[in-house]
Image (tube, rainbow, N blue to C red):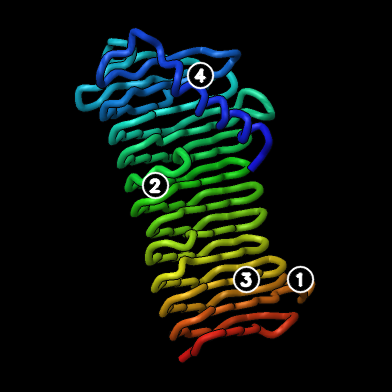
Amino acid sequence: MSRTIAFMTLMLVGLSANLPANLSANDVEVVYLNGMVLIEGDSSDNAIEISRVYNSIHIVRGLNGTTVGGASSQMIYIADDLLVEMFDGDDFIDIRSLHVRGNANAQVVIGLGEGDDTLIMENASVRFNILISDPPGSDGNDIALLRSITCNDLDILTELGTDQISVVSSTVNENLEIRASGAATVGVTHSDIDGGLFINTGRLGADTINVIANDFVWTSIHTSDRNDNLIIVGNHSHYVWGSISLNNGNDNLTFEHNQMGDWYTWQGGALLVDGGPGTDRGMIRRVMIWDPIVTESWEGSFK
C-alpha cells in the first residue's frame, strides 16, 4: 500500500470524530477539501449511487430514503481524488463509470465503516490507486463486487465477519492485494495484473478462494486455520508463480490448467505449496512449468 494511500486512510479515521453538525439521519455530505472530494456518511443505514455524467463530472444520488446534503442528489467535480467514508450503519454504495484521472496520483479511497456494507463498483478508471477498507477490528459482513476496473494498485482490506470479495475483468497495472480477517469468499477472475496477486484471508473462518483465468507476474495465497477450499484454474504467471499456504485445517485444493513461466524465454515458474497440519485433499494436474518442479510441502497428510 502506498504512503499516499496510508496517509489518506489515517486522515479519514480522524474525520470520524469531526462530522459536520448539520448532518441529519440518513444523509451524506459532500465536502471539497484541498482538491479532493470527500463524501461522508453518518451512523444510519445509507444508500448512495455515484455515477459519471461527463468527463470528471459525476452525480451523487441518495437511494432508499438517503439524502445528499439534504437533497435527493448533488453534482460533483472530481479534479483529483475521491474519498468516501460511510462510518456506522449498514451502507450500500453503487459506483458506476467512475472517472478519476486528474493528476498522476489521482486515487480513490473508500472506507466502508462499521456494519454490514455492500460496495458495487463497475467500469471505473482511476489513474493511480484504489483502496477499499474496514476500520480496524470491525466485524461487519461486507460485500465488495468490482468489475471492469482500471487502476495502478488495487487494495481491498476487510476485517472480521463473513465477507464476499470479487474482482472480475479488471486491469491492475501493478499489484492486487486482498486481505480479510474473518470467513471470506474471494474471487479473482479474467483479470490482467501486471504485478503480483496477493490474497491473505487471516487465521479465522473457513474460506473459499477462486482464482480463474487471470494473467499476473507472481502470486502469494495464504488461507486461514479452518477448512478452506481453493480453486486455481486457467491462470498464466509470466515469471514465477510463488506460494500457496493452506495453514491448519482439512483443506481442498484444485490447481490445474495453469501456465507458470514465459512462453518466449522458457524460464520461471517455481511453485511452493504448503498444506500445513491437517488432512488435505488436492489435485495438481495439467500444469505447464519451465524451470523448477512444483514443490509440495505438507506437515499433515495430502490425499
> In 3D space, how far apart are the residues under numbered discs 3 and 2 (Cα atoms)?
25 Å
> In 3D space, how far apart are the residues under numbered discs 1 and 3 (Cα atoms)?
23 Å
Q: Quadrant of residue 105?
A: top right
Q: Are there few (<14), some (14-19), or many (20+) residues within 10 Å of tag 3?
A: some
| Residue 182 relative to residue 270: left or right | left
**Res 264 label:** 1
The reply to whether callout 2 and callout 1 are in contact (CB within 8 Å) is: no
Mark found first going from the N terminus, 4 or 1: 4
The reply to whether callout 3 and callout 2 are in contact (CB within 8 Å) is: no
Which residue corresponds to the image point at 59% horizontal and 61% vertical from the top-left?
A: 215
> In 3D space, how far apart are the residues under numbered discs 4 and 2 (Cα atoms)?
22 Å
Which amino acid is tagged 2? Leu
Which amino acid is tagged 4? Val
Which residue corresponds to the image point at 54% horizontal and 62% vertical from the top-left?
A: 214
Which residue corresponds to the image point at 47% horizontal and 84% vertical from the top-left?
A: 282
Q: Are there few (<14), some (14-19), or many (20+) residues within 10 Å of tag 2?
A: some
Mark found first going from the N terminus, 2 or 1: 2
Q: Are there few (<14), some (14-19), or many (20+) residues within 10 Å of tag 1?
A: few
Mark found first going from the N terminus, 4 or 2: 4
**Res 37 label:** 4
Which amino acid is tagged 1? Tyr
Q: Are there few (<14), some (14-19), or many (20+) residues within 10 Å of tag 4?
A: many
**Viewer-side label of 4, 3:** 3
In the rendered image, the residue lying farthest to the left is 65
Which amino acid is tagged 3? Ser
List x then y, in percent, for residue 142: 35, 46
List x then y, in percent, for residue 230: 45, 71
List x then y, in percent, for residue 223: 49, 66
**Viewer-side label of 1, 3:** 3
The residue that disc 2 covers is 145
Q: Which residue is at the front of the view, 263 or 24? A: 24
Mark found first going from the N terminus, 1 or 3: 3
